[in-house]
Image (cartoon, grey):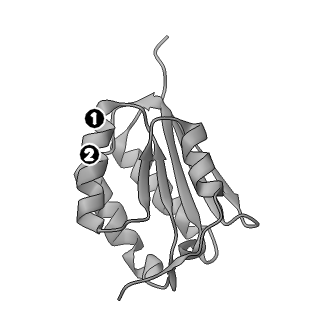
Amino acid sequence: MSERFSMVFKADPQSRLLRVTATGPIDSRAYVDRCIAFYNSIDEVWAYDRLYDQTQSSGFVAFEDLDRLVKAMAPVWGRARTQPRVALANPKKLASARFGLVTQLVQKPNHQLFDTLEEAEAWLAEPHDRDPCLT
């Protein structure tokens, strides 16, 4: 039996953290569609840090789907007064190259890539002042 793609979403209003966990071979379009639906279900989603756990998945989210996500959420994320942090836990070498390109495109120093989920969680748990958004 082959492994199936699945996603789990969690929102913690107290810690202001959104967690997106993917397992199995990533279906890029479905990944982004589900993220958009999840984000749209959260009040003041722009104020949450985000953790993407891809440690138990294979494949990647295509650039055209990432672009679709950014365009769909831009009006919502544009309401932010501070820059939430974004952590991606993905130990694959291809993720490093792709993540570097994405961070260059969005030009956000608050995006970090980690090999393990534990490293990503530790970084997000560190006390920090939220950087003001640059307009």
Kindly indicate the quadrant of the structure image that contains residue 94: top left
**Residue 102 appears in the picture as rendered:** yes
**Residue 24 appears in the picture as rendered:** no
Q: Which residue is mark 2?
A: 98
Q: The disc labelled 2 sits on which kind of residue?
A: Arg
Q: Residue at x 38, y 76 (%)?
A: 74
Residue 18 to residue 25: above or below? below
Q: Position of residue 4 (x, y in %)?
A: 49, 26
Residue 94 numbered tag: 1
| Label 1, label 2: how far apart the Cα atoms are | 6 Å
Q: The disc labelled 1 sits on which kind of residue?
A: Leu
Q: Residue at x 55, y 46 (%)?
A: 120
Q: Position of residue 117 (x, y in %)?
A: 56, 38
Cβ atoms under marks 1 and 2 closer than 8 Å = yes
Q: Position of residue 109 (x, y in %)?
A: 38, 65
SS label for mark 2: helix
